[in-house]
Image: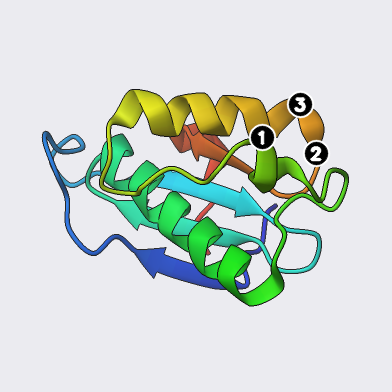
Amino acid sequence: MMRARRLLRCRASVRGTAAPGGDVYGLIDWDDAPILIVGATAEAVTREAIRIFAATLATTGSLAEDDPGFTDRHPLPDADGPLPAIGGWLAQLRPVTAVPWFAILDDDMVIAR
């Protein structure tokens, strides 16, 4: 069972929504404090993840402990920019570091307490 240290609701949903009564869940997995993001769309959840990465980068100066120069070579995309650019950046982040990583969770992966 995953225990999130922080739960964030997306500020606003963009296009489309989850099934009636449903939510979309995203997870940023940090070593010590995973963050569960809840929103109405996968797009809104993904954009919120980029906002969290941006705030972390501004605070710590690095995102990928395994590759501290990652954001120098691959600048963080604008959270309100094109979704393909955001997806491409996340795809580049995944192979260079185990922590942090981001994923949209399916309902079977989310266990409510």
Toward the front, the furthest residue is 72
Locate residue 5, reporting x and y percent: 62, 72
Locate residue 30, reporting x and y percent: 72, 58
Q: Residues within 10 Å of mark 2 (few under 14, many from 20)?
A: some
- The CA distance from mark 3 to mark 2 is 6 Å
Q: Which mark is residue 97?
A: 2
- The CA distance from mark 1 to mark 2 is 7 Å
Locate residue 34, reporting x and y percent: 65, 61
Q: Quadrant of residue 24?
A: top left
Q: Residues within 10 Å of mark 1 (few under 14, many from 20)?
A: many
Using residue 106 as the reference point, say whether residue 99 is left or right of it.
Answer: right
Q: Which mark is residue 7?
A: none
What amino acid is found at the position of numbered circle 1 in the picture? Leu
The residue carrying mark 3 is: 95
Q: Quadrant of residue 103?
A: top right
The residue carrying mark 1 is: 93
Q: Are marks 3 and 1 in contact (CB under 8 Å)?
A: yes
Q: Are marks 1 and 2 in contact (CB under 8 Å)?
A: yes
Numbered disc 3: secondary structure: helix
Image point (26%, 47%), residue name: 80
What amino acid is found at the position of numbered circle 3 in the picture? Pro
- The CA distance from mark 3 to mark 1 is 6 Å
Front-lying residue, 12 or 80: 80
Q: Is the residue 30 above or below the residue 101 in the image?
A: below
